[in-house]
Structure formats: structure tokens, C-alpha cells
Image: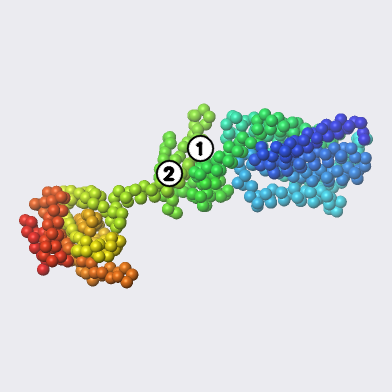
Amino acid sequence: MSSSIFPFIVINAISGVLTLILFLYAIFKKETFSFKPAFLSMIGMAVIYIFGHVFELASRSLEEAVFWVKFQYLGLAFVAPTSLIVVMHYAGLEKYLTRKHLFLIYTIPVITLILCWTNEFHRLFYHSVHLHPHTSAHLIDFEVGPWYIVHGCFTFGSLFVGIIVLLWYFRQTKSVYWRQISILLLAFVLPVLASFLYLMGYSPYGMDPVPSVMCITSLLYFSAIVSTRFFKLAPVARNHIFESMLDGVLVLNRSLQIIDYNGSAKLVFNQLNPTSMGKPIEEIWAVELVQKISDINGKHEVEWASDNQKHYHVKMTPLMKRDQTMVVGYTIVFRDITNQKQIEERLKELAYMDGLTGIFNRTHFLEKSEEQFVQAIQSGEDLSLIIFDIDHFKKVNDTHGHMTGDLAICHVVEIGKSGLPTDSIFGRFGGEEFIVCLPGMNMSEAGKIAETIRLCFETRPMVTGTFSHTITASFGVAQLNPGVDTLTTLIQRADQALYHSKENGRNQVTTDWEQGRISRPG
């Protein structure tokens, strides 16, 4: 062993020991690492690389040195891409680390390892390998082959992409994370600079200075882990808060292009995937809604029903620069309010609808009919009312029970709805009594509709199991005329006509003609 390179062997050995301690520390402190496998892989490969270089420097022959060079590549080929994967996890971009992408990332390192170990057969990695001519130590010198250039470009490319990602993430995060990111940046930049000096021929005795530099990077990692809870704060904040949010979140730039989203957003928009990044939001969301919600200077909120019958409360908030002088993007939060809307609809039904039959209850019928009554008076259009109730309903209840009575009411309503115009207002007036408002119809037309429904009752008996019963009803019809000034008066006219039907034998229609005179249609 040459005494001239002994200090470098010591420095590299110290670097290897520190990196090994970091590796073991990470294992025993695994609960603090949210992406432990990638980080351990990176450090473990660095350990192989560094100790391989130590034994290369300490070699006593060219053959021994070549063996340790090959050993180094068990780690060296994979350190840079694995470092990039660690940074992707740290910056919250792990959604891009699909199996396909990981396969592509590791394809070149695997080929590099194979070609390095089989170089004697093809000379694609090194054209030639020999001892360095200007030192007594057994230091290797070589002429690079074509694949060595590919490997070098890929290594530098991985590190440069990692640096770019960290710089991007630096701009996105709060100052509490800046020290963490700065440490990672330094850990990336130092090996890049050392490799550049090595390739330019400025390293002592032509030795690879990167393993020595890793002594510094290991100390940086130790400092970060102890002082800033490295690899814990930012990923937990991003992954375990952003990704676990029940609300769907889209992050847009100023041009309303998608730059991030969480898992819940994929439940809102099934077409979201990594290829959606950078695309306009209009490609996944209705253009008119995007325009409506983005035409703002401050916060804006809308309700939106998706194609799958889900209801969302949508809130868009501008993202401002740190000095609050410029909008740099937007967040859109989609909160699922489907259950809330269903409850609201149910409450509306309970407020407006009859619980047994599903038609309007008395209160809501009167509200809707009053609107039509006022409109008819103002426009001079016709308006008629029909009131009817089930004949001898008490007998049905007393004979067959209240459940059968409820079935009879539902049977009557079903037939009644089938015989009414679509713009009619149908309500349960009370018990077995029902009322219909017919906008735009005179009394003659309303009487014909009532007669049609009466005949349907008569010819379509109610059948429940083995029980069949013909239900009949009595009807009263009244029309808006100059002698009717309120809806209550009109209802009273129709009710008088109904009373006349019941007094004259039931199962018939009676209309209220002008001057309150009662007659039966012939």
C-alpha cells in the first residue's frame, strides 16, 4: 500500500463507517421514516460503493483492484436513481412512482451492472483497464467505453432531476421545511461537484472523490435527523393529511392547469391519473362551472351535482405569493354533501308531502293553489277545483282494519294521479278526502276529468291477496268566477257540490254552476 494514498483510504473508510452507522440508525429508528425502504436502499448502496472504493485503493494488484471496482457497482449503479426516488417521496410526488416508471428507472442501472461485470467479453463499459502510470499505488486508470458514457449521463441526469424537484419543492413549502430541503440539496450538489472534478481530471491521483464527499453527506443526514426530524415532518404533513383528507382537492396553477390532486379527488373524477398533471381542468370538469367558479377575485363557492348523482359543495381559494401580492394558483375543494342533500330532500318531503300517499299535504296544496289562484285572477284564465272522498270509508276500516284502509287510500291516489293532467296540483285534504287544482280548465272540462276518475274507481277494484274490494268516491267540482274572490270560497263551492253528491246517493260527480246553483251533469 502506498503511503501517498493512505490518508485518502482513511478518509474513505471513515466515510464508509459513518454511512454504515447512518444505515443502522435508520433501521433502529424506522418508525421515524415514512419512506424507510427507499432511504435504506439509498444508504445501503452508498455503503457498498464506499467500502468497495476503500478496498480498491488498498488493492495489491490490478486484478484485485478490478474486482473491487466491480463490487462498487453493486451500489454505485443504483445510488443516483434511488436518491431521486427518495426525493420524489419527500416532495410528495410518489404517485409518479408506478411499477412501470420504477422499471424504467432501474433498467439502465441493471444493464450497467451486467456490462461492468462482463466487460472482459465486450469492452462496452471500459475499452481498457490498466494501472495509473504516475503513482506507485495500484490505482486503476481506464479508457471509457460507450456504455460508461450512458451510465454517467444517467447518473448525472438523476441527480439533476432530484435537484430540480427539491428546488421546486422549496418554493412550495413553508420556511419550517427550508432547512430540511437545503440539507437534501447540499447532499445532492456535493457528489455532483465531486464527480465533475473527477471527470475533468482535477482529483488527486485520478481517484474518485465522491466516496470521501459522502462523509460530509452522512454527517448532514445525521444532523438533519437529530435536529429537524428529517423525513418526518413534511411527508407526514403531505401524505397523511393531504392524501387522507375525505374532501377531494385539486391544486391548479394560474392558468387553471392541474398540478396536484389527492386520492379523494379521484373518487370525484375517475379520469384523474398522473397523465392529468399539466392539463387544463376543463378536460375533467364542465367548462361553464370552471368559468363560474374561477371568475373571482376572492373565495367562491357553488353546489354541484355530478353525473353519478353525487352532490358536492365546491370551494375555490386563490393561492397567494408569500407577500400576498399575486395569485400563483388555486385550490378547489370538493366536499361530498350527498347525504346532507338527501336529508334536506327528505325533510322537504315531510314538510310538503303526505307521508302515506306521496302527494301534497293540505298545507302545501293550499300554498301552491293560492299561487295559481292569484295568477288566474290576474290573467283572466280559467281555474277549477275537484274535491272527492271515498264512499263509506269508515266501513272499510271497521270491517277490514286500518291497514286495509291505508291501502284503499293509496289505491285511490294511484288511480287519481293516472287520470290527472301533468300541471294539476293534487293533495290530500284530510283523512279520506282529496282535492285537485286544475289551472287553465273550466268547470265542464274539470267535470269530465272527475267523471273519468270516478269510472276508474268503479271498474278497477282494489286487490290485496285473496281480498278484492270495489271502491267508489263522490266528487264536487267548482270553477273560478266573478263571485269567487278567495281560494277558500272556491273550496267551499266545491265542497258544497261534494256534499250534494253524497246526499244524492254517492259515487257521482256534481258541479257548482254560476250563482252557486247545484246541478248534476247529465
**Residue 330 against residue 485 in the figure, above or below:** above
Position of residue 25 in the picture relative to residue 488 (left or right): right
Q: How many callouts does the rendering have?
A: 2
| Closer-to-camera residue (298/422) | 422
Query: How many residues crowd around disc 2 within 10 Å: few (fewer than 14), some, or many (20 or more)?
Result: some
Look at the numbered disc 2 and give the secondary structure of its residue: strand
Q: Residue at x 78, y 34 (%)?
A: 18
- Residue 22 sits in quarter: top right
Q: Nearer the viewer, residue 460 or 477?
A: 460
Q: Is residue 72 above or below residue 229?
A: below
Would you say residue 447 is visible in this rendering?
A: no
Q: Quadrant of the N terminus?
A: top right
Q: Nearer the viewer, mark 1 or mark 2?
A: 2
- The answer to whether residue 66 of the structure is visible from this angle is yes
When asked about the image quadrant of residue 134, the answer is top right
Which residue matches tag 1? 329
Residue 13 drawn at (x, y percent): 83, 34
In the image, 260 versus 426, the foreground residue is 426
Q: Is residue 162 above or below residue 267?
A: above
Residue type at the position of mark 1: Gly
Q: Amino acid at mark 2?
A: His
Q: Residue at x 43, y 46 (%)?
A: 337
Where does label 2 land, which residue?
A: 313
Q: Is residue 82 left or right of residue 341?
A: right
Mark nearer the N terminus (1 vs 2)? 2
Whole-Å distance between the Cαs marked 1 and 2? 20 Å
* Position in image of residue 353 (x %, y %): 29, 52
Question: Tag 1, which secondary structure?
Answer: strand
The C terminus - image quarter? bottom left
Asked which colour scheme the image uses, the reply is: rainbow
